[in-house]
Amino acid sequence: MTYSEFTIRVLVALLAGAVIGFERQWHHKSVGLRTTALVSLGSAIYVLLSISITQTSGDATRIIGQVVTGIGFLCAGVVFKEGLSVHGLTTSVTIWCSSAIGCLAAAGYYMETFIATFLILVVNVGLKSVDNWLTNRKPENEDQK
């Protein structure tokens, strides 16, 4: 892999992670611009390392699997339980998705990276009003069925 190819892949990962993080920070969430950008960038670096060291022999998916495990551990630390309420799940999953975005970019799937980034934004922004409506609606009366 050339230096320019490496640079393009990590910059695409960084940009995609920053876009997701900008949206999170814009909405005053606990994980924002720097965190998601770094998660995406770090994941990309690990995938590029994996691709590089397994060019002659080996399995590139082994390091990718460890990235998924490590990010899962990081995400678990973001989730908080207070009584019957659980907070931070969307933030946690956004970190997880940012890692996947970094993996896509590192593998050279640029269009897929942009599509997935767009879809993450659709979920975090576009589905928020639907989520709020579902959460705030009155429960159906079981006796009327």
Image: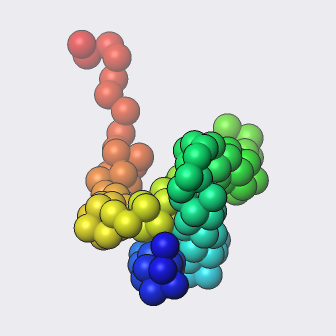
Q: Is residue 116 left or right of residue 13?
A: left
User: Residue 72, can we see it?
Assistant: no
Tag count in the figure? Answer: 0
Name which residue lies at 67% across and 38% down. 84
**Picture colour scheme:** rainbow
Q: Is residue 145 left or right of residue 139?
A: left
Name which residue lies at 25% across and 16% down. 144
**Position of residue 29 measured from the top left corner of the image (x, y, whole percent):** 57, 72
Q: Nearer the viewer, residue 16 or 31?
A: 16
In the picture as drawn, the residue positioned furthest to the front comes out as 56
Q: Nearer the viewer, residue 74 or 2?
A: 2
Name which residue lies at 41% across and 46% down. 135
Q: In this view, does 102 lie to the left or right of 63?
A: left
**Position of residue 53 measured from the top left corner of the image (x, y, whole percent):** 63, 58
Figure check: 30 above or below 127? below
User: Residue 131, can we see it?
Assistant: yes
**Position of residue 28 measured from the top left corner of the image (x, y, whole percent):** 55, 78
Query: Hey, which quadrant is residue 111 in on the image?
Result: bottom left
**Position of residue 62 measured from the top left corner of the image (x, y, whole percent):** 62, 43
Q: Is residue 136 left or right of residue 81?
A: left
* Quarter of the picture holding the C terminus: top left
Name which residue lies at 42% across and 67% down. 105
